[in-house]
Structure formats: structure tokens, C-alpha cells
């Protein structure tokens, strides 16, 4: 199979007593930003290190454009990655950092200047990287990832440490990379960023992918058919709606209930006909955060009872 | 080896100002210590060091009982006693064995120190020897002499050739050796001599004095003068520590017996007999300081990558890990070699020039030897930096790697340099530890016919220059191999 993008299949890795990866499988297709989310210890970073050939797995395969990473000649021309923005020698200038990377791939120095322009670091490129803010380091890391004009880009928490301007820039930048036809894998714990950026989501939990779907489908599934109702006459509304066949649940507010089993327009009709006053009837729309929390609840609970499991 | 990996590692090295500074500092330390060595000693006005036919420093101080011999001729004598005395305290002389105490016949081009000669002699512990040119030594019949078993000696001159013979009875002769003595004038001084070199006691030497009893002295040929003249050759000399207190050279004769007392030696000068002399190795003392600098840079060249996780970037850019490690080793080794070469090339002439200007005698070396020292010091530094790189890759921790390598290389060097370190300990260190590589700096050579203290702090190493360097190179190569295996196997 020579699938473009990243294909990981059945990754299994044990660190001593800890099973870090337990059958991790997913694929990252070109043209889409794929978000890679999950709680700490879910195996996201380990998976990325395995994809880059940095860590060996006990079982499974990770292929880039159909080849294992170690089989790539001049790998930065295939995959650009940023695992850790702090992975710099503080005494080297930003430009020198990119220059040695370029030399390692046989790339010309003008490619370095090009990616510096691309990420907006031209004014500080000849300063020591030790003095860079985290946001500047993220940009330098992105520049390094793009040095070889790769078809696959993989970034671990690229929003970390960015100021609001930087976050806006990064969102647009990731989308543009995907629009250029690249396969983009981005791990993040900022679900809202994923909602605005990713078209596809892989949710990791306990060393495997517990969801691998389009962002729109995940939100629809999490939203369900619930309707939020706000009324000063909760007991009356409850009896009317229960009689009509709905399931009613209390909410934290004294004047609110959540109704399942009836569409919102039918609830408005029923309450109006029975003279129950209400201030709000609204179909519940889940956020990506809700979808994520629902999917990972089990994994998080599991983690809570086994605190010895360490994250890597 | 991929050119890209080399180019990348070279770019990495040159773009960290601290590492470049460290290498420049290493070269400057070599030069700085050479300047300090050059100005640290003032020996202006010291008497000149006697030099042998090859320009090498020699000891040429002994008691000589001589007459001029014109042209060809021969001289024969019997020796029935050779006894030595060694001071054990102030004015406390005790009989003792001085293995290289010498008594016999010599034909020499005058009494000037360093002049050509050939001699045959009995010794305190090494039997009969024939010697010439200060460095040549041929063994004859073994065994000590006594009144019951005297030894007859004979020396014949024929042109430039002097031949030595020995006999147990004065009738049956054995040829011991023949020497072509260049520069021997038509009239030579010939006669009896007694020399008694310093006696070695553990880590110190004491000047000794010896007395020999001769009989049956007989000359053949054209002997001039009207009798035997006795006197000390080279009484005041940097290579002669003088007679023990209350003793002096002398000769007395009665009933055909001659009793001669003398001290000194006719031999190449060694460190103990020329303590004021300097060596190229001492000019390059700064090597150990440079070593610390290159060890630090060598270890940090990889350990900072582990500290900052930059190693992930490096290995993602070059998944061929062994190739990356080799590229690092080659770049670091080459940079360090160049640094060492520059430092040593500048240091030797500066240090030697300053020392000579201050009247310090420097043991002379052939230019090929000097080239070997320069290249050897550069190779020593390069091998040590690769060792530090390898240990850094293995332990992945800068301070740990630097400490380990300094303990392995610099510490034994410092222990070897301590003058009161027992010879057995310091020569063991110079054989098995990475500090054995300092042997590349040695310019002095041991002479079996000179009993002395041959140990690293005196400039004598148990291993040859390249063998010593190979010990360090071996440590570096094994560490590099272990580092390569671990880097290949471990998760980054």
C-alpha cells in the first residue's frame, strides 16, 4: 500500500510496566488538517516519536507515504515535524539552526531564508535562539518543519506559548498547508483550536485511537437530540412533557430542565397549549470540547484510579 | 559517510560561539604554558653542557691517569679490585654496589669534555664492557673482579679503529669489540680511568665514588711524556654532581700496583644527571590544560543535544544514527586536531626561544622527532575529544561525561607528574590509562648503560610515543563503538 500521508497500524509499545501504545491505528490524509487529541499519557507524543523513527515499537507499523521513516532518503523532504520548540541550542542563532538542518538534507542556504520569511522571523533570525520567546521558538520550529517542502507535516502542540496574534496566524497557516495538499497532523489540548482548524480528528485514549472521524460528525454525535428548557414552573413543565413521552432531567439551575425525545418546536407547542410559562427552549448544540470530554471520560476515569501510569 | 551529515555537524559546531571559543582557548593554553615554561627558569651564565659527537648532551667526568700516545699503539692492564662507596648521610660513606661503576683503559682525543674516545672496562655489576661515542656499549665476559680472579684488559689503536680485548689470565685473550672512532687526532691521551655514576635509591640518586686496583700496566707504541698524569676530566659540569663529601679523585702507585679513585661517568646524559635541562615535552605542559578544554567541548557537542532534546531533531533529520555519530566524531576530531596542531606549532618555537634566551639547556631533538611531538599532541587532543564525545553519547549527561573523561585522562597524568609517585605506580599509569598517550611528547630515551630513574615525571615513558597514543585511541575507539551500538538500539 502506498497511501499518501501517514498510516499507523497496530502500534504497541511497552515501557517497563506501562503500556504506552496499545494498538494505535489511524491515518492522516493529504489536504486535511488532522487533529490529534487526548489526555496526557494517551500516547500522542509516543506515536509521533514512533512515526519519526525516534522510538521503536514492539508491534505495528508507521508509514510515511508508504515507507517507514528510516527508509526515507533526506527525510525532511518528505516529513516536516516539530516535537518540541525548546529543542534548540541556545547559543546558536535561529538562522544557524535552520542552516545546519538544511545542510543535513543537502538543501541550499536560500531555502533557509525562504522559510524564515514564511514564518515571519526575518528580524530576529540572526539573534541567538536562547533569547527567543516560546512563540518565536514555535515559529522557528515551524520553519524547520517546512525546510524541505515536505508533503507531510507533523506538529506537537504548536499553539503552546503563542500570543493571540500568533494563534490566529497559526490557524490560518495550518489550514493553508492542508489547502496546498499536504497531510497535516497537529496534536493539541486546545479543543477550540481544533474545532476551528482541523477537519478530521483522532482522539487518543489509553494508547489507542478511540475516535477517528470528521470533526462535523463528532459534534453531531455528541449533540444528540436534547433540548434545554428554562421555566419558572419546573414541576408543571415536567409533568406535561413526561406525559407527552419525553425524558426529563434536571439541570444545575433551579429553573432549567433538559428534555430528550421531543423536538424543540413540539415542546414549544405543548408548553404553550398547557399554559406553562417558559423563557427559553433551545436545541442543545455540543462543542468539540463536549465531544472530546465524552469520548475520553472513560480514559480519564481509568487514569484517575491508576495514578502510577506515567505520561511520556 | 555522508557528506551532508559532515556538513551539518560542521555547521553545528562552528555556529555555537562557546565551542569555537573553547577550541581557541585550548590552543592559547598550549602557547601560554609554553611561554610560562620559557620564562620560569633563569640559568644565564650556567656552564655549557658537554655534547657528544652527535650533539647530544653527555656526562664526561671521570678520573683519568694518562699519557700521550702518538699513532698506533696498545695498552694492557689487569684489574683486581673495583669497590664503590655510597653516602648514606652527611659524611657517612658506606661500601656499596654501583653496577655501572667503571674501571679500565681509555684512548681519548684529549681531556676536553665530549671529545671522541673508546674504552674497555670492568664494571661493578655488568662484567667487562667496551664503550665508545658515549652511547655505544658492547658486553664482554661477565662477572666481578677480585684479587682471586682479576681481569686483564687490552686496548689497541690502529688508525681510527680501536679494539678491546679481555682475558682471565693475561695470556688467552677474547676480543670484546672494535670501534671506529671518528675525530681521534694523531696523538691521543691514553691510560687508566675510574668513573662512578650516581647510585639509584628508590626515587633519588646519590653521588658515589669508586676505587680500582690496577697492575701489570704495559704500553706499546710511541708514548710521550715522562710519566702518568692524573686528573679529573670535567670537574665542573652541569652533568656531574661532584664527589661525595670529603672524597676526591686520586691515584697512587707502589710495587707496580696503581690505585685509582674516581667519580662521574662517561655516558649519555639523562634527566637525573642533567636536572637543569628542559625538554620539548615540558614546553608543551599546556597540553593537559588544553585537554580539559577539548574534553568539555567534546562532551557538550553531544550532551547539549540530549539536554535540549535537540537530539530528536538531529536524528529525525538523519535517521542513520551511526552515520550521524561518525560525522560528529570526524568533525570534532578534525577540529581538535587542527587546534592542537596550531597550538603546538606556535608553542614550541616560542617556548624554546624564551628558554634558550634565559640560558636554559633544552635536550636537543631531531626535526622528525619534533614533528612527531607536534602531530602527536594534536592527535592526543583529538582522540581525547572523541573519547569525551563517546562517553557523552553513552551517559547523555554533560557534567557526568566531562567528569568521567577528566578522571580517566587528566587525573592519571597529574598523578604521573607527581615527582614522589613511586616509579612502579607511575609507569603502570602510563601503560594502562588513557594518559599513556602523553608518551607522544617524550623526547628523552632510556639508556640501559645508565642507571637512573626512568619515569614519566622525568620525561621517560614505558611505552613508545605511538604505542602510548594507541592506548588512548583504543579507549576512544571502544567507547565510540559502544556509543554507536547504544545510540542505534536506544529510543532517542
Image (cartoon, coloured by chain):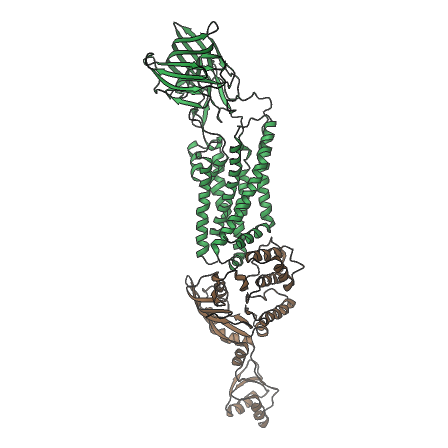
Answer whether residue B77 is visible to the viewer in this image. yes
Q: Nearer the viewer, residue B27 or B375?
A: B375
Q: Nearer the viewer, residue A180 or B485?
A: A180
The vertical placement of B260 against A97, above or below, is: above
Indicate the quadrant where residue A112 lies.
bottom right
Chain A: drawing colour: brown
**Residue at the spot 55% in from the left edge and 28% down from the top edge:** B362
Position of B97 with respect to B49 (left or right) is left
Percent of width and height locating residue A129: 61, 56
How many labels sit on residues?
0
Query: Which residue lies most toward the bottom here?
Result: A273
Indicate the quadrant where residue A257 lies.
bottom right
Q: Nearer the viewer, residue B204 or B433?
A: B433
Percent of width and height locating residue B27: 58, 41
**Residue at the spot 36% in from the left edge and 16% down from the top edge:** B166
Answer whether residue B84 is visible to the viewer in this image. no
Query: Which residue lies most toward the right here?
Result: A123
Query: Which residue lies most toward the front here?
Result: B159
Percent of width and height locating residue B89: 45, 20
The vertical placement of A247 against B125, above or below, is: below
The vertical placement of A101 against B31, above or below, is: below
Chain B: drawing colour: green
Percent of width and height locating residue B212: 40, 13
Q: Nearer the viewer, residue A148 or A123?
A: A148
Position of B425 with respect to B168 (left or right) is right
**Residue at the spot 61% in from the left edge and 70% down from the top edge:** A176
Amino acid at each position: 500500500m502506498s497511501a499518501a500521508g501517514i498510516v499507523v497500524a497496530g502500534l504497541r509499545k511497552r515501557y517497563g510496566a506501562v503500556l504506552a501504545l496499545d494498538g494505535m491505528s489511524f491515518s492522516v490524509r493529504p489536504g486535511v488538517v488532522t487533529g490529534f487529541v487526548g489526555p496526557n499519557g494517551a500516547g500522542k507524543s509516543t506515536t509521533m516519536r514512533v512515526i519519526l523513527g525516534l522510538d521503536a515499537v514492539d508491534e505495528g507499523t508507521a508509514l510515511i507515504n508508504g515507507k517507514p521513516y528510516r527508509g526515507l532518503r533526506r527525510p525532511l523532504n518528505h516529513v516536516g515535524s516539530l516535537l518540541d520548540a525548546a529543542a534548540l541550542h541556545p547559543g546558536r542563532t535561529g538562522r544557524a539552526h535552520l542552516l545546519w538542518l538544511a545542510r543535513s538534507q543537502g538543501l541550499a542556504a536560500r531555502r533557509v531564508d525562504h522559510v524564515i520569511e514564511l514564518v515571519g522571523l526575518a528580524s530576529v533570525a540572526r539573534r541567538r535562539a536562547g533569547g527567543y520567546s516560546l512563540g518565536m521558538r514555535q515559529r522557528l520550529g515551524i520553519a524547520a518543519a517546512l525546510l524541505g517542502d515536505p508533503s507531510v507535516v507533523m506538529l506537537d502542540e504548536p499553539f503552546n506559548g503563542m500570543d493571540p496574534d500568533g494563534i490566529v496566524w497559526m490557524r490560518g497557516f495550518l489550514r493553508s498547508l492542508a489547502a496546498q495538499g499536504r497531510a497535516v497532523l497537529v496534536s493539541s489540548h486546545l479543543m477550540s483550536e481544533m474545532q476551528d482548524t482541523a477537519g478530521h480528528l483522532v482522539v487518543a485514549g489509553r494508547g489507542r485511537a478511540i475516535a477517528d472521524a470528521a470533526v462535523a460528525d463528532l459534534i453531531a454525535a455528541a449533540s444528540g437530540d436534547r433540548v434545554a428548557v428554562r421555566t419558572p414552573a419546573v414541576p408543571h413543565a415536567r409533568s406535561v412533557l413526561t406525559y407527552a413521552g419525553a425524558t426529563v432531567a434536571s439541570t444545575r439551575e433551579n429553573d432549567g430542565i433538559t428534555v430528550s425525545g421531543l423536538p424543540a418546536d413540539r415542546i414549544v407547542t405543548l408548553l404553550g397549549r398547557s399554559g406553562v410559562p417558559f423563557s427559553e427552549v433551545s436545541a442543545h448544540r455540543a462543542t468539540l470540547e463536549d465531544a472530546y470530554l465524552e469520548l475520553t471520560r472513560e480514559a480519564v476515569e481509568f487514569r484517575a484510579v491508576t495514578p502510577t501510569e506515567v505520561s511520556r | 559517510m555522508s557528506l551532508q551529515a559532515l556538513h551539518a555537524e560542521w555547521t553545528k559546531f562552528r555556529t555555537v560561539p562557546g565551542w569555537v571559543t573553547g577550541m581557541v582557548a585550548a590552543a592559547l593554553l598550549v602557547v601560554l604554558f609554553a611561554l610560562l615554561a620559557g620564562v620560569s627558569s633563569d640559568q644565564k651564565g650556567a656552564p655549557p653542557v658537554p655534547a657528544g659527537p652527535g650533539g647530544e648532551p653527555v656526562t664526561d667526568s671521570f678520573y683519568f691517569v694518562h699519557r700521550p700516545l702518538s699513532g698506533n699503539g696498545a695498552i694492557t692492564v689487569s684489574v683486581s679490585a673495583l669497590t664503590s662507596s655510597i653516602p648514606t648521610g652527611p659524611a657517612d660513606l658506606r661500601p656499596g654496589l654501583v653496577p655501572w661503576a667503571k674501571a679500565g683503559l681509555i684512548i681519548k682525543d684529549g681531556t676536553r669534555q665530549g671529545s671522541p674516545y673508546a674504552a674497555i672496562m670492568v664494571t661493578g655489576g655488568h662484567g667487562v664492557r667496551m664503550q665508545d661515542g658515549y652511547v655505544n656499549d658492547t658486553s664482554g665476559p661477565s662477572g666481578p673482579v677480585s684479587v682471586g680472579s682479576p681481569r686483564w684488559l687490552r686496548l689497541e689503536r690502529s688508525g681510527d679503529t680501536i679494539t678491546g680485548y679481555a682475558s682471565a689470565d693475561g695470556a688467552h685473550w677474547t676480543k670484546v669489540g672494535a670501534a671506529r672512532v671518528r675525530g681521534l687526532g694523531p696523538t691521543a691521551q691514553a691510560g687508566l680511568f675510574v668513573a662512578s655514576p650516581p647510585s639509584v635509591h628508590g626515587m633519588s640518586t646519590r653521588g658515589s665514588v669508586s676505587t680500582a686496583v690496577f697492575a701489570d700496566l704495559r704500553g706499546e707504541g710511541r708514548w710521550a711524556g715522562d710519566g702518568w698524569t692524573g686528573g679529573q676530566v670535567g670537574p665542573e659540569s652541569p652533568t656531574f654532581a661532584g664527589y661525595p663529601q670529603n672524597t676526591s679523585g686520586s691515584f697512587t702507585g707502589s710495587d707496580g700496583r696503581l690505585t685509582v679513585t674516581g667519580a662521574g661517568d662517561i655516558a649519555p646524559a639523562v634527566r637525573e644527571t642533567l636536572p637543569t635541562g628542559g625538554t620539548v615535552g615540558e614546553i608543551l605542559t599546556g597540553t593537559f590544560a588544553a585537554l580539559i578544554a577539548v574534553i568539555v567541548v567534546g562532551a557538550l557537542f553531544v550532551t547539549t543535544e540530549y539536554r535540549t532534546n535537540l537530539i530528536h531533531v538531529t536524528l529525525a533529520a538523519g535517521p542513520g544514527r551511526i552515520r550521524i555519530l561518525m560525522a560528529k566524531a570526524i568533525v570534532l576530531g578534525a577540529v581538535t586536531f587542527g587546534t592542537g596542531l596550531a597550538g603546538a606549532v606556535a608553542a614550541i618555537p616560542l617556548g624554546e626561544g624564551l628558554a634558550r634566551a634565559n640560558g636554559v639547556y633544552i635536550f636537543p631533538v631531531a626535526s622528525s622527532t619534533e614533528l612527531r611531538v607536534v602531530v602527536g599532541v594534536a592527535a592526543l587532543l583529538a582522540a581525547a575529544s572523541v573519547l569525551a564525545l563517546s562517553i557523552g553519547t553513552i551517559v547523555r549527561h554533560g557534567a557526568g561525561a566531562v567528569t568521567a573523561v577528566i578522571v580517566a585522562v587528566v587525573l592519571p597524568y597529574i598523578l604521573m607528574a607527581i615527582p614522589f609517585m613511586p616509579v612502579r605506580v607511575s609507569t603502570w599509569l602510563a601503560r594502562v590509562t588513557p594518559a599513556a598517550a602523553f608518551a607522544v611528547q617524550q623526547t628523552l630515551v632510556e639508556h640501559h648503560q645508565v642507571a637512573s630513574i626512568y619515569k614519566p615525571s622525568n620525561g621517560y615513558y614505558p611505552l613508545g610515543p605511538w604505542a602510548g597514543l594507541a592506548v588512548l585511541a583504543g579507549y576512544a575507539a571502544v567507547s565510540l563503538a559502544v556509543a554507536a551500538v547504544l545510540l542505534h538500539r536506544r529510543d532517542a
